[in-house]
Image (cartoon, coloured by chain):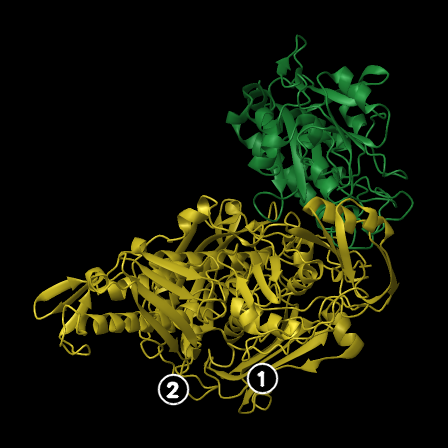
Chain colours: A yellow, B green
Amino acid sequence: MSDSIIGAGPKRIDGQRKVTGAAPYAADHHPDNMAYGYGVFSTIARGTVTGLDLDAARQSPGVIDIFHHDHFPELHRSPSSMAQGNKVEETRLPFEDNQVHYEGQFVALVVADTFENARAAARKVGVSYQRDDNAIANLDQGVKAHGTQKGQGNHERGDAAGNFDGAAHSIDVTYTTPVENHNPMEMHASVASWEGDRLTIFESSQGVVQQRGALSKIFGIPQEHIRVESPFIGSGFGSKLWMWPHAVAVSAAAREIGRPVQLVVPRQQMFTTTGHRPETRQRMRLATDERGRLVSLRHESINTTSFTDQYVETCGSVTKSLYSCPNLLVSHETTRVNRGTPTSMRAPGAAPGLFALESAIDEMALAAGVDPLEFRMNNYATRDESQDLDFSSNHIREATEKAAEKFGWQDRNPEVGSMRDGHEIIGYGMAACNWEAIKRECEARVSLRADGTAYVTCATQDIGTGTYTIIAQTVSELTGLPLEKITVRLGDTSYPKGPISGGSWTTATTLPAIAAATREAIKELKGYATGEKGDFAGVDSDSDSLTFENGQLTHDGQSVDYVDVLKGQKLASADGHAHTQGADDKYSYRSFGAHFVEVRWDPGISNLRVSRVVSAIDVGRVINSMTARNQVEGAIVMGLGMAHFEATEYDARNGRPVNNNYAEYVVPVHADQPPEVDVILLDYPDLAFNEFGARGIGEIGITGMAAAVANAVYHATGKRIRDLPIFKEKLMENVPEVQSA
Amino acid sequence: MREFDYARADSPRQAVSTHGRSEQAAYLAGGTTLLDLVKIDIMRPDQVVDINRLDLNQIETLNDGRTRIGALVTNTALARDDRIKNEYAVLSEALLSGATTQLRNKATTAGNVMQRVRCPYFRDGVSSCNKREPGSGCAAIKGHNRSVHAVLGTSEQCIATHPSDMCVAMAAIGATVTVEGPDGQRDIGFLDFHLLPGDTPEREHALKPGELITHVTLDAPLENSRSGYLKLRDRASYQFALASSAVIVTLEGDTITNARVALGGVGTKPWRALEAEKALKGQKIGEASFTHAAGIAFKGATPYAHNAFKIPLGQQAIVRNLTTLTAQEDRRTS
């Protein structure tokens, strides 16, 4: 397989279109006669809209219509079932009633002839509210006001409580993580147009099929009458997995006014009405025996959810199986706050969950007097104890060892603050990373065409990760066609049903379907070749002696180019369609890895930076070495943002998000990239999982990163930061105490 | 859209006469503040006077040793200018620490002096804000006030920081702002240009209605001085200062003969720390004298719920800047 294109690192086949501006994103679509929508958003977090003064807005230039709770077509809710293919995160429809559940909720939609006119008119809409002064602004207020609700994904084995008291070593610590927003560069956008009762919508979406299903339920029209297109998206990180209220609002508006309507969600409302990673509070109770073996592990989390829906951040999802422990409890609860509905954000559950778990493991190791690396090696599970299953493929020990060696962990002086370089104190920290490998059902179609090209369709999406490219690689591998002869079309519900681009499951889900469809196309081709008019008439088309390689059909020493087979019979193409199934339950399928992080803390200017990262990742086989590495590197950088920059701050008095822009919501910039980021991809094919042995790579890189940074910060400073982000003031001495308002 | 009249001026005089004395008119230079705030509906000019065609692009050394900077010299051009780099290193460094390359290419000298605050309660158009709506109150004082709120020069009416880096360097260097207005030309001392919020936070500067900045003239550099700008923030680029210092010192041996200290990110205006300067003068270089002076700079500082760390952080910005400047022989200027 050394010359295989699977595992090579070809450039993205869509790269040139992207960098030259030729790739159309949602808001680049301008159907004829298109109008523009602009929202009016609530300025209170809880209460009732008691009146709308629309006179000035109606008289504003170019205004076509203004929609609100007293002027909006009657629609239906989506049952919001992923299995049915109609999941939405926020089930309440826009303008369903006059209730306000969060700041930044749609209270009206102005439609006008230009974007500027729509925006100007939207600002002239006067909204009167009956403000409810009991807005719940954060997790603590929610728990205090009305307690918690039980979530899903809980797990219990053995007797964790009974084996905690009296254990040789134990810790009982609580971690918190703030709200984070996905902040993809491209804002959410929809362009909706109707022809009769048929709807076409361009959306920046990670899941066109689910959006079609949801729109079908909401508008009460057949799925076949709806086309959702998302050929390119400027990333999503989970915020674009499920349709949000703006897409419903704009689709309804377009039908009402009989014109296509475009709406781009303003950056400020990207913080309110398109999901976020919820705030979490996680209590960790761990205990070991004298030798530092875990005997009890409890991971109990609460996350914030909205008043309209329950979203559970499954913080303990990894905790169930990463370490061997006979007595274990994982529980998830939620509490309602006046924020929009949360949603998956890159590595949902695991990203905040592993901050708590892998920080706690570090604390536990210290309490037990064991080196954190050794502690992990001693406690890593060898099989999935939560499901009583073997792992399909688990190389976490090798990953940990390889990364440790490359990083130079053995040079670490364990004493806090002992490693110095000029003004700076150096800290070393590590953490494991982990993510479930998931494979879903998928359909795909492949045509081998008489012009010498292949044409591939699947209604999944490329969210910037390289899906177009790895699909082309797969077809190339099986046909011998060069990548430039392979056209891949994704992100359109008129193609065979593909998966949402989330959960790191696109690779494992789509590639088997693409391969099966390619084989079907080859089979059809062989049928033509062996038919009565064919070059190999009379040969058994299923015979092993009839081969297809490098675009050539060969039998008994005679080769024919597949193009000639088709042309000879005046045929346009040989086509294959496939429908492949999800993963079996014979094994526990997971990806593994370890991060090693060096931080530098300059106490003289209170400056913290991540200066070096070495990560070894075991994700099965790597399909494209360039895009795979890029995914892990990007996740590492996102993880260091989570570690010490990112937090959506809410005003505790009224629940309004405060830093709702790119300047004050701090994500890492180029200058924050660690000078050294070294990603080791172990590349062990997981053939029990799928024929390519690939498990997916989008999320695992961010898991554990914040803990690795926090553990390194502890090593440098002696301060255990249990509340993200690790802002400098949490590490500073002599900060005056101020009574909080 | 919200309509306004747009006029392009060919001379300062014409700009001033088009603008008139209206409070609702605005001059447009780089637009990096004005256009942003118009787009989010916080500034609502009815007349915009585009001054980009004015001949105010020069950096000139005057006979008395001062350096005169045209209002339209971009932040990039000013930072890259050889005289500025050599004689006013603190200014070049301050400029390059601000914003991003793209913004610096558009932003102008006068525009930077005139930039508005980053307080989210000012910019949201909803919360109480005495700057935006005098008398409505200040939501920041008891709200979230970590990054763009001050500990020096605050009042019961407003605690927003002045966001500029450039102005902090100019406050340390000493400068004069030349304006042209309906009543003719006049000069305003740089330290008198920006106003403390006091009871009138809506008044941010000393310009009278219609006055146009035409030049900023830097005082002659201190002879044999060395200078530098140190900016502290969360991420390494594209963030307003949590605390910064502009420092200029002259030494004789190990003794400080003259010092200028100005602070950013901590004050409601570009903050000249005159008392700290006095405390440094005549002292031996070293941590003791630096720390002492830094403490004086923050005497009387008022911490709020989320920004109390700026008091020690600002002191660190002074101490480290002085330490670095007095340790490096090769940074001597003039």
Residue A54 at x, y percent in the picture: 84, 54
Q: Which mark is residue A586?
A: 2
Numbered circles on residues, count:
2
Q: Nearer the viewer, residue B137 or A566?
A: A566
* Res B89 visible: no
Residue A500 at x, y percent in the picture: 50, 69
Residue at which label 1 appears: A154
- Which residue is drawn at the image coordinates 40% and 68% (left, top)? A507
Q: In this rendering, is residue A312 above or below A702? A: below
Q: Nearer the viewer, residue B188 or B224?
A: B188
Amino acid carrying mark 1 in the image:
Asn
Amino acid carrying mark 2 in the image:
Lys
- Which residue is drawn at the image coordinates 67% and 26% (left, top)? B109
**Disc 2 secondary structure class:** loop
Question: Same subunit under labels 1 and 2?
Answer: yes
Is B210 left, or right, of B114 in this rendering?
right
Q: Which mark is residue A94?
A: none
Q: Quadrant of the C terminus of chain A?
A: bottom right
Q: Nearer the viewer, mark 1 or mark 2?
A: 2
Ranked by sequence position, the earlier of labels 1 and 2 is: 1
* Res A554 visible: yes
- Which residue is drawn at the image coordinates 36% and 80% (left, top)? A392
Chain of the residue under the numbered disc 2 shown in the image: A
Residue A456 at x, y percent in the picture: 37, 63
Chain of the residue under the numbered disc 1 shown in the image: A
